[in-house]
Image: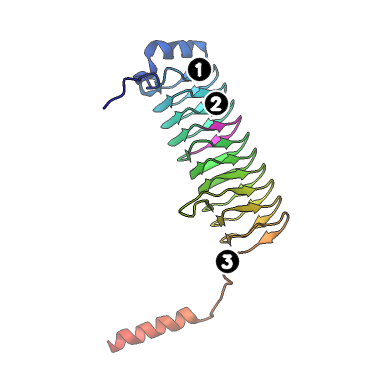
């Protein structure tokens, strides 16, 4: 059954008169025909909306921000000078001034991306605060997490926040460095300035300014590959 409530439904073309008013006020709308705006959306003068952008709910785009192309925002505040790049979905969250999101980022409700922070391609946030100047550039899932300022989260990092019954929090404190392909098993705290080595699975708190390694020791067997190739060749000959 269809709902009669259309108060939050974007207008196709954003409503020609409304888009014209925004343009006259100093908003850049590159392609009005592919721009969809809900009736409660606010776009400040000096902001830029690129083609195939959908703004819904009580979304606010501040002056100097750039949104799109191919972006959908639902109840999102985009701070001044922030950029929401190609193919992103954000819901019920805040992007602070001069932060960058995307391309191909998914920001789920109750998230906040701090001033100057960077959320990159194929990264998902859920109920997470990414601190000012912190970055998660690519290929990560960060859920139920508080990330302090100046943190680096390497590619392939996952916070394991769910055990099948309950959700648990992760805390990554200021200046910490989390190496690529890291698994952080919540509840967990990574202390201020700590380093987590790439490829680690971390199950206990990491003290500040320490290095943690949670991976198997590398074993090298010289000549093994050549011996295997010789054996395979011999088997093929005998055939």
Number of the front mark, 3 or 1: 3
Q: In screen coordinates, is 64 left or right of 36?
A: right
The answer to whether residue 134 is visible is: yes
Q: Which residue is mark 3?
A: 215
* Residue 155's disc number: none
Task: For mark 3, give the secondary structure.
Answer: loop
Task: For mark 1, give the secondary structure.
Answer: loop
The boundaries of the magenta stretch are 93-102
Q: Residue at x 53, y 31 (%)?
A: 83
CA gap, disc 3 and disc 1: 51 Å
Number of the front mark, 2 or 3: 3
Q: Residues within 10 Å of mark 2 (few under 14, many from 20)?
A: many
Q: Dividing the image into 4 quarters, which one contains the C terminus?
A: bottom left
CA gap, disc 2 and disc 3: 42 Å
Compared with 150, 236 (above or below) is below
Q: Which residue is mark 2?
A: 65
Q: Which residue is mark 1?
A: 27
Q: Which image quadrant is residue 227 in?
A: bottom left
Q: Dividing the image into 4 quarters, which one contains the N terminus?
A: top left
């Amino acid at each position: 059954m269809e709902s009669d409530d259309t108060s939050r439904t974007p207008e196709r073309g954003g409503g020609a008169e409304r888009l014209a008013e925004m343009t006259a006020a100093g908003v850049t709308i590159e392609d009005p025909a592919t721009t969809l705006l809900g009736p409660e959306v606010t776009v400040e003068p000096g902001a830029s909306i690129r083609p195939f952008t959908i703004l819904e709910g009580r979304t606010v785009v501040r002056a100097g921000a750039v949104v799109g192309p191919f972006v959908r925002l639902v109840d999102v505040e985009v701070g001044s000078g922030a950029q929401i790049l190609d193919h992103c979905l954000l819901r019920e969250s805040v992007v602070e001034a001069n932060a960058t999101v995307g391309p191909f980022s998914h920001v789920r409700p109750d998230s906040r991306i701090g001033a100057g922070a960077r959320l990159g391609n194929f990264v998902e946030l859920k109920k997470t605060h990414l601190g000012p100047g912190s970055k998660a550039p690519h290929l990560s899932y960060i859920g139920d997490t508080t990330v302090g300022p100046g943190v680096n989260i390497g590619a392939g990092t996952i916070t394991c926040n769910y055990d099948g019954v309950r959700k648990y929090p992760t805390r990554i404190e200021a200046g910490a460095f989390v190496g690529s392909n890291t698994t952080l098993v919540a509840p967990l705290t990574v202390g201020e300035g700590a380093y987590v080595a790439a490829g680690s699975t971390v199950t206990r708190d990491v003290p500040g300014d320490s290095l943690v390694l949670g991976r198997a020791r590398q074993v090298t067997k010289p000549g093994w590959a050549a011996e295997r190739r010789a054996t395979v060749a011999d088997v093929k000959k005998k055939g």
